[in-house]
Amino acid sequence: ADWRIAGLSAPRAVGRAGTGIQNTCQMMIAPLRVIGGPTGRASVLRRIGRTRKRRNEKKAADTNGMDIEFLLNGETVRIADQPATRTLLDWLRETRKLTGAKEGCNEGDCGACTVMVTSLLDDEVRRQSLNACILFLPQLHGKSVRTVEGLKGPKGELHPVQSAMVEHHGSQCGFCTPGFVMATRAFLNQNPKASEEEIRKGLGGNLCRCGTYHGIMQCAMEIAKKGGA
């Protein structure tokens, strides 16, 4: 199988909801300065976080009454009166019409819906590559979400990871490609000098049913050689 050629982990059977999060989530810590210091995105996250208690302490305990505020591809988003169990994936696709994140397993196992979530913890930025299908909207309050649509440059140009994916033929049907792009971008942004083995582990939570793992690995290795995403 191609995943053996690329050195990736073998695909495993889909389990119960939530079990895949242990494999697909990459917890990554970066210094505050990497996103502009106190005057950059971190300050926006901090401000949003401070308002959470003030806005919600007057609400009933029912989560449906919460005001949710977060950054989506750099834009401040405010949501009110959404069901507590509505997932980020459903909201992105149905409300925002951002369809890059795909619904594959809907259990957090395949990585087709991968997004980057950034949060501020003790003046450090924590970046996570997460599955939008098992993220509920209230969990995003005070955080920053970036989808594959948010990777494009100011003039609409492709992100280097996307360009490398095209060059190395890392996509066949294309269904899993946005998830792999986001996972690659997140991992190599945080680990710019990652080894081949580290990259294999970092992308191990994303599945390609067409078997284009070799091209995906070539894409990731090229980005790593250039100093990260």
Image: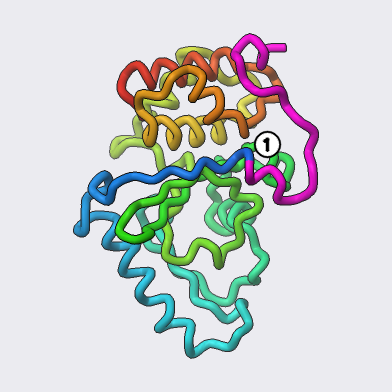
Residue toward you, 223 or 25: 25
Q: Is residue 20 found inside the magenta-colored segment of the image?
A: yes
Q: Is residue 23 found inside the magenta-colored segment of the image?
A: no
Residue type (three-letter) at the residue carrying disc 1: Cys
Residue toward you, 116 or 128: 128
Position of 136 relative to 79 (above/below) = above
Query: Number of callouts in the render?
Result: 1
Q: Quadrant of residue 25?
A: top right
Q: Which residue is mark 1?
A: 110
Q: Is residue 191 left or right of residue 31?
A: right
Badge 1 density bin: few <14, some 14–19, many ≥20, Cα 10 Å = many
Residue toward you, 216 or 147: 216
Span highlighted in magenta in the image: 1-22
Question: How far from the left and from the top, in percent, is residue 68?
Answer: 49, 70
Position of 59 relative to 157 (above/below) = below
Question: How far from the left and from the top, in percent, is residue 188?
Answer: 41, 30
Q: Is residue 153 left or right of residue 214?
A: left
At x 67%, y 45%, the residue is 108
Q: Check the image and name the residue furthest to the top.
A: 5
Q: Quadrant of residue 39?
A: bottom left
At x 29%, y 47%, the residue is 31
At x 49%, y 24%, the residue is 198
